[in-house]
Amino acid sequence: MNEFPEDLKQVFRNYRDAHPDTEVSANFTPILWRKIESRRRMAGSMAMLRRLAQAFAGVAATAAVILGVFVIPHLQDRAEIQSVSYAEVVANDDAQQEMAKAFTIPAAYEPPVVLPDEAPE
Amino acid sequence: MPRQARSECAGLRMLIEPEVVGRARNGDEKAFNQIVQAVRKPILGTIRRLIGNPDDVEDVAQEVLVRVFYSLDQLRTDEGFEPWLYRLTVNAAYDYLRKKRRRHESRMSDLGEEQVTLAEAAEGTKISADANRKTKARELVDSLLAGVSEQDRVLLLLKEVEGLSLKELEQIYEVKENALKVRLFRARQRVLKAFGEKKGEE
């Protein structure tokens, strides 16, 4: 079926006659230009927003690099210190004290006095 | 005599010289204004027939022309302006009809408003026979097209009411003639069935 029957074609023709090309209102073109301008302003704002976002992304990337190069190694050192447990610190401290005792001569140390009669023959 | 953009589109009634289109594409706002002057009336008429709601016709037409203004650089050739303009018009009509459906504003409620207006008018003044005939014609086509999708409604109206040929529709939709024929055939079948039922009721 490539065509409608004649009575149905007539229905569509009547519809066409019922909707002739309408007259354009006086402010159609001014409103159109206002819409074009507002879309242009919106596009301008979007472009500025995009530029701001790009600048922000650049600053964020630079900050990330600075953090990566200077701050993170420093934090890692601190993290190593903090990663030792309390028990390890105490045990380490005890061991150090024992070691120190073994190699330290007490301030009040006096060598043993060897008497003559006790001297070995 | 200068070539005119309608050379391949006899059904499209907007006479615009490709040279004007070319100037508008290069950002000449005077040329764009010339285009607006030439196309606004037929565009309004087409949109009026496609969407059916007189209150929103100017809004939709302005949306089409805003899209034209911002997309002119996408136009491949100056001669292809009119099918392209029709394509933008058809797309804007789809968008409008889709939004309208989403808002649950059915066509029947619009008709209801028209009927209310007519009823109010009838109380005080005598309705002219001509207005009555036009309302009936609108109601009949709206009821026949109620059973087809928005796309098929627009396609049928372009073919049967706007009088565009298959060749012109091919340019607007950018699809092969056979695909269009199949789609038109299916849409016509539905409308014909609805028409038969209407006649049966009478």
Image (spheres, coloured by chain):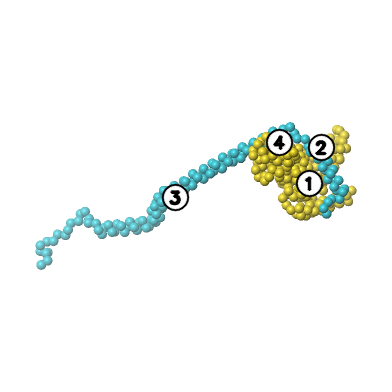
Residue name at image x 50 percent, y 45 percent: A58
Between residues B39 and A45, which one lies in front from this camera angle? B39
Residue A117 has which mark?
A: none
For mark 4, what is the residue?
A: B34
Asked if badge 3 and badge 2 are on a common chain, one would say: no
Q: Position of residue A19 (x, y in %)?
A: 81, 40
Label 4 vs label 3, nearer the camera = 4
For mark 2, what is the residue?
A: B117
**Dividing the image into 4 quarters, which one contains the N terminus of chain A?**
bottom right
Give chain B's shade.
yellow
Amino acid, disc 2: Thr
Marks 1 and 2, the one that precedes in the sequence = 2
Q: Residue furthest bottom?
A: A121
For mark 1, what is the residue?
A: B164
Marks 4 and 1, the one that precedes in the sequence = 4
Between residues A79 and A27, which one lies in front from this camera angle? A27
For mark 3, what is the residue?
A: A68
**Mark 4–mark 3 contact, CB under 8 Å?**
no
How far, Cα to Cα, is label 4 from label 1?
24 Å
Label 3 vs label 2, nearer the camera = 3
Amino acid, disc 3: Gly
Q: Secondary structure at mark 1?
A: loop
Amino acid, disc 4: Gln
Label 4 vs label 2, nearer the camera = 4
Please report, as a chain letter, where disc 3 is located: A
Asked if badge 4 and badge 2 are on a common chain, one would say: yes
How far, Cα to Cα, is label 1 from label 3?
66 Å
Q: Secondary structure at mark 3?
A: helix
